[in-house]
Structure formats: structure tokens, C-alpha cells
Amino acid sequence: MADGTAGHIATKPALGIDVRLAARNGTLTGHTSHLAHGFVQGNLVVLPKDLAGDFLRYCQLNPKPCPLIGISDPGSPHIPALGADLDIRTDIPRYRVWRHGALVDEPTDVADVWRDDLVSFVLGCSFTFEAALLDDGITLRHVACGANVAMYRTSISTQAAGTFQGPTVVSMRPLKAADAIRAIQITSRFPAMHGAPIHIGDPGLIGIRNIAVPDYGDPVDVHADEIPVFWACGVTPQAAIAAAKPDFAITHAPGAMLVTDRRNSEYAVF
Amino acid sequence: MADGTAGHIATKPALGIDVRLAARNGTLTGHTSHLAHGFVQGNLVVLPKDLAGDFLRYCQLNPKPCPLIGISDPGSPHIPALGADLDIRTDIPRYRVWRHGALVDEPTDVADVWRDDLVSFVLGCSFTFEAALLDDGITLRHVACGANVAMYRTSISTQAAGTFQGPTVVSMRPLKAADAIRAIQITSRFPAMHGAPIHIGDPGLIGIRNIAVPDYGDPVDVHADEIPVFWACGVTPQAAIAAAKPDFAITHAPGAMLVTDRRNSEYAVF
């Protein structure tokens, strides 16, 4: 993404803080895929504090789609554990603002709509395990194509907590059998980044009717000698927000993540 | 196997040494599946010492089908690392004797054909990882049916060493997707017991034409909601012996393994 395209920065930032600063000063307004190699990126969910308890419980009940890696104090836009200077209001390249479950805006900062009763949640993201897969020499077709990963709503319900409920959303990567086995091993090391897949093989068994038509992201071919491999996805809470219809919520825009100062390797359990 | 059937012992032996003693005194002449729960069982290959170097290299080149866990001094029937009293000539319930690559006998001891130039090799066995899968609550259909596992010659060639060469033989267990993912995690912990599967899904991709007709063992149904999962198998060296045609060789009879004093958990890498 060092191509100078509008919304992207001209030099590839080496550190998490470089990405945050570029988002903060408006140089970066697009996606964060493969920026700051080796640093953890996260999904963002911001909710009024009267819903925070329910959402925390929702994450605890659904650790594969919603692995919580950071949480703010109520009203604070800071999460020091993920970055000393980190400011949730400005450090993400693009946000989504939700009112009563409907997406109403996609701004590049949320300082003007910030409220003193908001709690921020950061959830692990598949970019961490994708980096580990790529480092292992596994080809990921959506990365090779410069596309977004294909994502699907499934028939696997999440465990409800308060008003939060909905389907588990999965991301799918087609892999040859040997790579699928290796990918299960590698992603098992990262339980905080969705961990091992939750399904392999027949998409119909988890309620996906047409693999060629994802519900989010871009379609990707599955070749005859490949198996579709499905991981729980951080878009799941956005489906839960659409169901819960809180009066106000903020998330990241898909692909435009919060880049932290934590290293991917810190989250490898063995 | 505490059913009093001819060739089986009346009480289920608790320790590896109990199984060896039962084999040694002729009480046990059948298979060892699920005897001495928690103790490592091994595949046996005995060869004249002039072939031992080639076979060692064959194991080193093909660690998934041939994970070496013990080796004797030339001429010695003992492998103290696997059991202080262990005697290769008597402690296996049933043997196979091979001359010039042909199976010529299936005796219950090999003391009368023993030679001073023989080297014994013990290779890890899937019984270790099957115990871990069963302990995790995964149902293995061949175990539930009291059958032998289904095994197949594949189009995956082993790496040749001297005259030793041939196809990789695999064992197949049909599993639901979630159990297949878990089984990949669990068996990855046991690289000395064939480790992770080498294939999942379409049998044709590894040269298996008819999944209903195994080359060794018993057929097992694969249900519509299951994926066949294939592990490298300790029968592979028997195919290599058939190819190498050494003037003399001894192996265990399929399912009648060497039971050791080592614990399965000692071989778990994490």
C-alpha cells in the first residue's frame, strides 16, 4: 500500500505508532492491511457504558468471534495497554457511526461525536494470523489478489447477552489440504486472534448457501483441489450491534483497523 | 479386550510390562489396542545390520510414517530405553517373518529364528494419538465398531534410502469438521506418533480410488457430514520391506504392537 493512492501513505510505516499518527493527521484514510508488519491490529467497538456490561458478557460467551484484547475506562478514549499515546477518537483511518442499529456515517475521526459515557472495546483481528500464515509460505488468494477476505453470515448462532445476539460471521480462505492442516496448527497459536478455524469443507453445513456470494468482503475462487477453511470473524459484533440497535455505537470501517504497539508474537500461546 | 476370547488375556493389563509379560508367556497372542491405557505402543521393524544404516536413513527422511522412538544395538534383543526387561524376541503378541520381501510366517515369538546380526527399530504408533482423541471425547468409528482402522496406499511416495522405497501408507478416520480441526490440534502434539494428518478431504488427491476398499484393515463408513482425515501410518515400512526384499526381516503383525514402559504424555511436545 506504498503506492501513493489517495488515502494511503507514501511510505510503508514500520511501527504501530506510525500508522496511528498517519490516521491521526489524516494522511491515512484507507485500510491498514500489511501496514506495520508484526504489530497487532484490532477490531473496534465503542458503546455507551450502560451497554458495556452486556457487551463484555457477549465477548466472554463468544471468544472465537469476539476475542477481547483491550478495553477503556468509561469515557476515556485511551487504552494504554495497547499504546501509550493511543487515542480511539482519531487513530483509526476510518470509522463507522451507528445510530439505533443503522450505519449513519463513515468519518475519518469521531472527536466531534464523542461522548463522556463511551466504553471502547478492541478485539483481536485475523491480520495477526494472516501474517503468520504468509510468513510460513502459505499463499492467501485474497491477499495475492489485493482483495478483502470473503465473509459470510452462518447458521451458527452466537450466545446472546442482553440485547446482543446474532449469527457468527466467518471469514473464508481456500487452501490446499496440506496448507489447511498447517493453517489450523498456526492459527491455533493465536486464540486472541480468532484462533483455529471453526469449520472446514462443506459450506452448507454452516448455512452458507452460495460460497461465490459473500455477505461482506470480496468473492474468491475455490479451486477443485482446495478446501474452504472458515474462521470466526471480528465482523460478528457489527451484526450484533445491528440486532441490538443501541442508540449510539462506533466501530472501525472494515479493513481500517486500530494498529497497536503490541507485537503479534506476544499473543502466540506456544 | 477383557472378553476371554482365545488369544486375549482375561483381565485388562494396567501397565506396559503386564502386556509384555502376557505376550512373553503366551497368554496374549492377539492385538494390543486399548491395553495398558496411557502407555506408548510401537511398530516393530527388525533387519540385518547391513541394512540398518539404509533403514535409519529411510526413517530420518520419512519422519511422519516412520517416527523412530527406539533402536537396539546390533544383535541385541533389548531396548532398555523403552523397557528395562524388554525382549524383542518374545514380548510382542504376534510377529510377521519376511524372507526376500515375502511374508512367510506369523509366529507368537521369534526366538527360534533370531540372529546375531539383527537390529530392532521401534516406530511410534497411532494408538497414542487415538487415546488422546478418545480422552478429548472424539468418537472414532473404527474403535466404536471394534474394527481395525482403514489403511490405504497413496500416491505420495516416500523418500527412498538405499533399497527402501514405496508409497506412504495412511490410516483414515472420518470426522465431523469441528472434530477434524480438534484432531489436527491434538495429533500435532505427538510428532513421534505420526503427528498431524497429511491430508484431509478428497481421497482422490492422494491417489485413493475407492475409499470403501482399504488396502489394509477394515472399511469404515464416511457420513455426508464428515471429512475423511488421513494420517501417515506405521504400515509404510512393511511396504518398503516388500519393495527392498531383504533376505530376512521381522515386523509385528498389524495391531499386535510392542507395548513399552513409556507414557504417551512423555511424547506430547506442548
Image (cartoon, coloured by chain):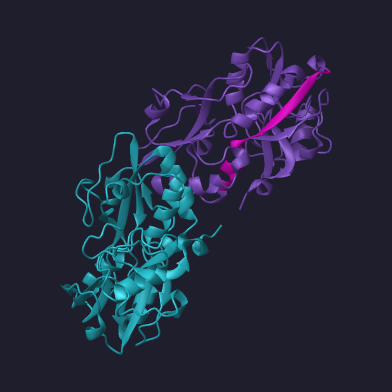
Chain colours: A cyan, B purple
- Residue at x 71%, y 28% (from the top left corner): B121
- Residue at x 50%, y 39% (from the top left corner): B197
User: Residue B217, can we see it?
Assistant: no
In this rendered view, identify the residue nearer to me: A220 or A61.
A220
Residue A107 higher or lower than A221, as above or below:
below
**Residue B257 x, y percent position in the rendering:** 67, 31
**Residue A80 x, y percent position in the rendering:** 45, 80
**Residue B40 x, y percent position in the rendering:** 68, 40
Q: Quadrant of the N terminus of chain A?
A: bottom left
Q: In this rendering, would B145 be left or right of A238?
A: right
Q: In this rendering, would A90 be left or right of B240?
A: left
In this rendered view, identify the residue nearer to me: A257 or B3.
A257
Kindly indicate the quadrant of the structure image that contains residue B234.
top right
- Residue at x 29%, y 37% (from the top left corner): A223
Kindly indicate the quadrant of the structure image that contains residue A23.
bottom left
Kindly indicate the quadrant of the structure image that contains residue A114.
bottom left
Instruction: Write down the region rendered in magenta.
Output: B116-132
In this rendered view, identify the residue nearer to me: A26 or A180.
A26
Residue B127 magenta-drawn?
A: yes
Q: Quadrant of the C terminus of chain A?
A: bottom right
